[in-house]
Image: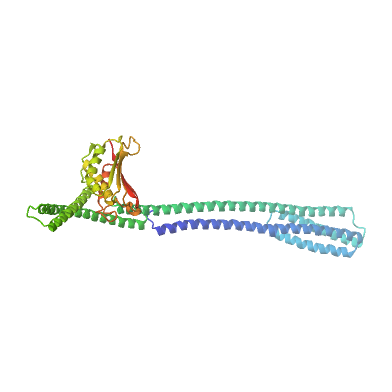
Amino acid sequence: MRGFTIFTRLCLSYLIILLVVISLGGYTTWRFDQLNRITRSVSSVDSEIIRLANDIKDSFFSQSGFERKYIVSGDKDFLEQFLSAKKNIYSQFDKIEELTGGMPKERIFSSTRSAYKDYVSLAENEFEIVISDSNASGKEYRESRDELVNRVIDGLNKVVELTKRDMDEKIRISNKIGSQSLKLSILATLIIIIMAVIIAFYNARTINRPILSLMNGTRCIAKGDFGKPLAISSPPEIKELADSFNHMCARLEELDRMKSDFVSHVSHELRTPLTSIKEAASILSEGNLGELSVEQHNLMAIIQDECERLIHSVNSILDLSRIESGMMEFQMEKYTLSALVGKSVSKVKPIADQKDIQIHLKISPDIPNVFVDWGKIDQLIVNILGNALKFTPAGGKVWISAYRAGKESEDSGKMVEVSITDTGSGIGGKELSEIFDKFKKVHGKGTGLGLAIARNIVEAHGGKIWAESVYGQGSSFFFTLPGV
């Protein structure tokens, strides 16, 4: 079905199942028609033959009795009853002859009828003799008569016996047909169910897999990973959708690259004049060009602070741009983690003292040295500590811990895990899942680049970074670094 549309696939699938059902229905109807014909034959032919044969026997026994009585007594009433029975028996013989036409037992029936006819002729001849001589009935007549009577009875018994055999055979065949039809119906039902499941699974798989690929591609784009174009060739509707999706991805990737280039270019252009403005404000604040009033000095301090903030933002944008483009250089060396963390803490200590926030260090003595870029890891720790101090109220606490990360293995080597925990305001569930994305601000503060840069730095070192938080009860940030 490759290359068929979804609608065509479904129609063909249902058509195949429908043809199987129709074939099964036709075969079952034919077999049940056979069964009905056999049942009708048993009920309307064989049963009737047996009934008529038994009736003939009963009538024949009565007729032979009338024959004997007439010969003995000469009473014409017995003769009339004999003739009436003869007429009735011939009528019944005619009915049986119609029913046995073309059957194997027709020859036996014909012989039986012929014997009866001979018996009637013999009896009527004897009747004529009786009319003229009442003592005419002799031994020869009785012997012939008894022989014919036995032939008629035996013939009728054989007809009944053969008919019963036919009935038994027909019942056996009907049972066989019913059993075969039942087995076939069960087998066909199972085949139809299996076919329906296979067809449904095939259709669902060939439709579901491309849709899942599109969904995964959409998730990757949402994360900023454009990846490779989707290669979907069937069904045609989804292929067309995939082609449009690939075109959209290519366009979005181009726009993202243009945006990154633009941001990088603008950041470069902004950093030089901002540095000049900061230096100029510094010169004016120092009074090198004349004394400033208190109000002017305050304004110059504001200009310097804002320039510093803008320069920091521009540097963050440039750092992120270089990391994402793979142009950031890392000078990897072996360091003692306690010394590295101590230097980073010393940078933020004045802010902590100003807010009366206590910083507690807990460095495990058995952790290995780390193989990192000192400047980048310092930037990482200072960034996370700065956020912790920013969102922790006065009198709060911040803990920094470092310890071995899990168990050592030959494949993963030694990893060191660092955690920074605060007693601040915490982060909500929705914000927590997005804090490492670009331009995602915590509580609406900052540029939203610090944690994105932190994630890229950790991943560039081969580690992982994550956060845990309960809103209103503080946050914990964890990251791992390679040990040596």
Between residue 150 and residue 369, name the one nearer to us. 369
Query: Total number of numbered labels?
Result: 0
Q: Residue at x 36, y 58 (%)?
A: 237
Residue 165 in percent (x, y) is at 70, 51
Residue 64 in percent (x, y) is at 84, 58
Between residue 59 and residue 471, name the one nearer to us. 471
In which image quadrant can residue 40 be found?
bottom right
Which residue is the extreme one toward the left?
A: 289
Residue 457 in percent (x, y) is at 25, 45
Residue 63 in percent (x, y) is at 83, 60
Between residue 62 and residue 292, name the one nearer to us. 292
- Quadrant that contains the N terminus: bottom left
- Quadrant that contains the C terminus: top left
In-image side of 172 versus 323 (left or right): right
Between residue 18 and residue 446, name the one nearer to us. 446
Rendering colour mode:
rainbow
Q: Residue at x 25, y 41 (%)?
A: 341
In-image side of 175 versus 114 (left or right): left
In-image side of 275 versus 11 (left or right): left
Q: Residue at x 14, y 58 (%)?
A: 295
Residue 433 visible from this viewpoint: no
Residue 75 visible from this viewpoint: yes
